[in-house]
């Protein structure tokens, strides 16, 4: 009888121990998730950007007309791809101005630290804007998105990867046949640079931990090659709805359109991304073209950051990178 009582008591202690252990594990998991959430929010907060996309761009043509200093009713006609070369209405001044953007940020109350960071962003834009504009003229990839991605991925050209490899977009090298075999067999420590094949114009690979300790990134001769490699990546033929398919973005969301509906695209990628159309911008499905493009990159798997699309959009708004897109479209329309 005593033995039975001892067994019952032991089982009771074990059950209590298991319950409290499970409760502790759940608590730790919740704290870690909360820390991760705040870390992501803090990462956005640390960037030298203005969080105002919802304040004026998402309102549609009314807000957009204020930015372009044009009457609301004339904008859709002026920015349509079918605009007549003989149109007599003067198009807005779309000149991007370093000092004007800097003054805007200073007037917005940026701290001295954020203004110094903003200067690095502005220096980067000023140095690389012509490459982005040329690439847009050749390929249709928005200069605003390209510059925003480069700023974010390379830390305005100051990251270790950017300085070591001229890789400004975090583009990874793919494992070749021997590399894939080692990966399948989980022989991660046996992987070498020779197990990866860079794509032209890349000239080699660079080992740096990202998602995995065995990751390799492509290495380029210069920044221009990095920009062109990015264009190759986001314009290659692919099937809508499959991870890594980005070429549809540049035709689906026309430059200048303030109300691009992302519903269909988000639904196409949902089986992969598990992100609903409402996920991206606080329930808004109709977005300015560049925000829709940023959401398109996110839903198609360009980056793992939960706020990647927001960061790109805020960078574009803050530094008025949309002006480069408008300028290219204006010039192409004659």
Image (cartoon, rainbow, N blue to C red):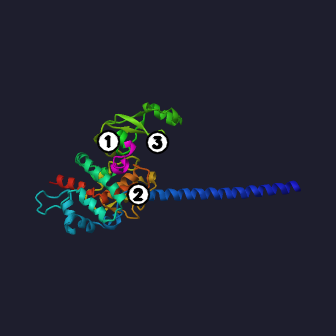
The numbered mark, 3 or 1, whose residue comes first in the sequence reads: 3
Q: Which residues are magenta?
A: 149-161
CA gap, disc 1 and disc 2:
26 Å
In the figure, is residue 311 to the left or right of 189?
Answer: left
What main secondary structure does the magenta stretch of the protein show? helix
Q: How far apart are the two marked residues, 3 and 1, measured between alpha carbons?
A: 20 Å
For the residue pair 313 and 269, the one nearer the viewer reads as 313
Q: Is residue 142 visible?
A: no
Q: Earlier in the sequence, mark 1 or mark 2?
A: 2
Q: Is residue 81 magenta?
A: no
Considering only vertical position in the picture, is 185 above or below 260?
A: above
Which label is found at residue 46? Answer: 2
**Quadrant location of residue 279?**
bottom left
Residue 209: mark in rendering: 3
Locate residue 285 relative to residue 101 in the image: left or right. Answer: right
Q: Residues within 10 Å of mark 2 (few under 14, many from 20)?
A: few
Quadrant in the picture for the N terminus: bottom right
In the structure shown, which secondary structural element does the residue marked by tag 2 occupy?
A: helix
Q: Which residue is mark 1?
A: 226
Q: Secondary structure at mark 1?
A: helix
Query: From mark 3 to mark 2, how far is it between C-alphas?
Result: 22 Å
Crowding at dot 3, Cα within 10 Å, few <14 / some 14-19 / many 20+, comes out as few
């Amino acid at each position: 009888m005593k033995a039975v009582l001892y067994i019952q008591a032991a089982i009771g202690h074990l059950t209590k121990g298991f319950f409290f252990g499970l409760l502790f594990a759940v608590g730790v998991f919740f704290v870690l998730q909360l820390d991760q959430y705040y870390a992501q929010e803090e990462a956005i907060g640390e960037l030298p950007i203005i969080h105002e996309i919802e304040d004026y761009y998402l309102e549609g043509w009314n807000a957009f007309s204020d930015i372009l200093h044009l009457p609301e009713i004339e904008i859709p006609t002026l920015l349509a791809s079918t605009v007549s070369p003989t149109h007599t209405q003067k198009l807005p001044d779309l000149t991007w101005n370093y000092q004007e953007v800097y003054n805007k940020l200073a007037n917005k109350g940026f701290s001295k630290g954020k203004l110094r960071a903003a200067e690095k962003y502005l220096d980067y834009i000023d140095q690389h804007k012509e490459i982005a504009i040329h690439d847009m003229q050749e390929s249709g990839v928005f200069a605003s998105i390209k510059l925003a991605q480069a700023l974010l991925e390379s830390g305005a050209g100051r990251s270790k990867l950017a300085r070591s490899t001229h890789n400004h977009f975090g583009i990874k090298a793919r494992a070749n046949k021997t590399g894939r075999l080692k990966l399948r067999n989980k022989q991660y420590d046996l992987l070498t640079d020779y197990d990866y094949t860079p794509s032209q114009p890349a000239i080699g690979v660079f080992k740096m931990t990202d998602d995995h300790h065995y990751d390799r990134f492509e290495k380029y001769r210069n920044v221009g090659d990095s920009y062109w490699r990015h264009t190759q990546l986001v314009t290659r033929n692919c099937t809508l709805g499959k991870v890594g398919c980005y070429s549809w973005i540049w035709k689906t969301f026309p430059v200048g359109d303030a109300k691009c509906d992302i519903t269909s695209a988000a639904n196409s990628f949902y089986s992969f991304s598990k992100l609903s159309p409402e996920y991206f911008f606080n329930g808004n499905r109709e977005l300015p073209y560049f925000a829709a493009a940023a959401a398109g990159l996110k839903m198609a798997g360009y980056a793992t950051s939960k706020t990647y699309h927001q960061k790109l959009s805020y960078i574009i708004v803050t530094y008025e990178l949309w002006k480069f897109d408008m300028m290219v479209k204006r010039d192409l329309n004659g």
